[in-house]
Amino acid sequence: MSKFNIVLCACRRAERGALVGSFFGVVEGFARAAGMAALLFVCPLAAAQSADESDMVIDKINFRFEGPRNVSEDAVAAHLKLRKGMKFDAKSLDQSIRSLYGTGLYDFIDVQRSRGSDGKMDLTVVVVAKYKIAQVAFKGNNEFSSSRLQREIESYAGSTLSEFQVKRDVDKLLEYYRKKGYSLARINYTIERNDENGTGAVIFDIDEGGDIQIQNIKFTGDPNAEKSYGFFERLGNTLFGIGDSDDVNSLKLLKQMKTDTWIWLVSHLTDNGRFKDEEFQADLENLRKFYRNNGYLDVEIDEGKVKFEFPDPDEPGDMDIIINVDPGKQYHVGKVTFKGNKLFTSEKLWPFVVLNDLGEGKVFSPEKVDAAMEEIRTFYGQYGYIDTIVRAIRRPNLDTGRIDMEIE
């Protein structure tokens, strides 16, 4: 601690002492008076010496490196706004330290001040530099090249070594593997530091775990969708519509999903049949939307009830997916009426309802309702009423169990 700091500390202690009470009022008053006297005597001296510090000329600037030395004195000096022969300025010193920290190359910066025998000021810059990455290596990556994996992370040779960033890079690599269908992948890392030159090698140790190949996708909870179809039945349905019906079935549900079963030879080319979590989450939402548009407005497909089974212990990568569906009640269209249509009669607008299959008794579909409203808006726009607002007000009819609609 410099002599100036000692004086200031004495000043602060005196000030605190002046405010501390004692056991007796007389002693308290004496202490307060003594403290004030100390302040009057010492604080002007501290202020005078602080003023003297700002008038001192810098004689020497020394550098002391602690830990790895992978930066030069010139690199540190380039950020200093103080030079030999200049008057000391606390503001410039603060800006210099901020500038050094801003480079991201240092863990710790301190500037120590001392008075030389000639009354001038000497500065000692204490530097603790961060390690730099000498090499980034990948081990165990058989499916993807090291150069491909390097593009997924932010750590690279020549950059500052940050263990926090390395951990984030592990998460990014895991995310990449899972997107590619390798949900069993595990990744660890090691950092080998060289204290002599201040560098470190980052090594990612990858266990790809093999890709998960989906053998079957099954549905439970909805009797209409519990029947499973083989590959040739699905192919016939896709090409010729074989097995199509108006009811919900597993064939229709599978068409809503990107997640598909593994097909030998084909999947190697298309990348289908591998489990990808992000893709599967979107599939579940598409299934919910499909059910709602088929009248099952209260459908529940709980992600927590989805089962992933590995039935063959000899093939740990073969997986079956079982999706539980609670369809609830299927709703139908009740009475459809128009309101506020002064320009065109209800009979003129009725074809938009029929063409979208929204007549009374038809399966209620939010998607078809939206399409009908959009077509009516377009119809009005053809006659110059481009700002026409059309909306369908839905009212559940407790007597009929259907959904009545008022289009206004």
Image (cartoon, rainbow, N blue to C red):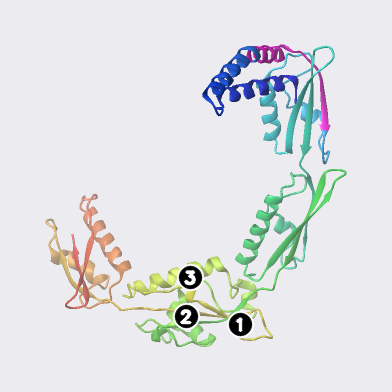
Disc 3, disc 1: CB below 8 Å?
Answer: no
Under mark 3, the amino acid is Asp
Q: CA distance from mark 2 to mark 3?
A: 19 Å
Residue 152 seen in the figure: no
Q: Which residues are magenta?
A: 43-64
Q: CA distance from mark 3 to mark 1?
A: 21 Å
Residue 266: horizontal and vertical position, in percent? 62, 77
The residue that disc 3 covers is: 283
Under mark 1, the amino acid is Phe
Judged by depth in the image, the label closer to the viewer, 2 or 3, is 3
Under mark 2, the amino acid is Thr
SS at circle 2: helix
Residue 238: give its label: 2
63 relative to 51 in the view: left or right: right
SS at circle 3: helix
Residue 146: horizontal and vertical position, in percent? 75, 59
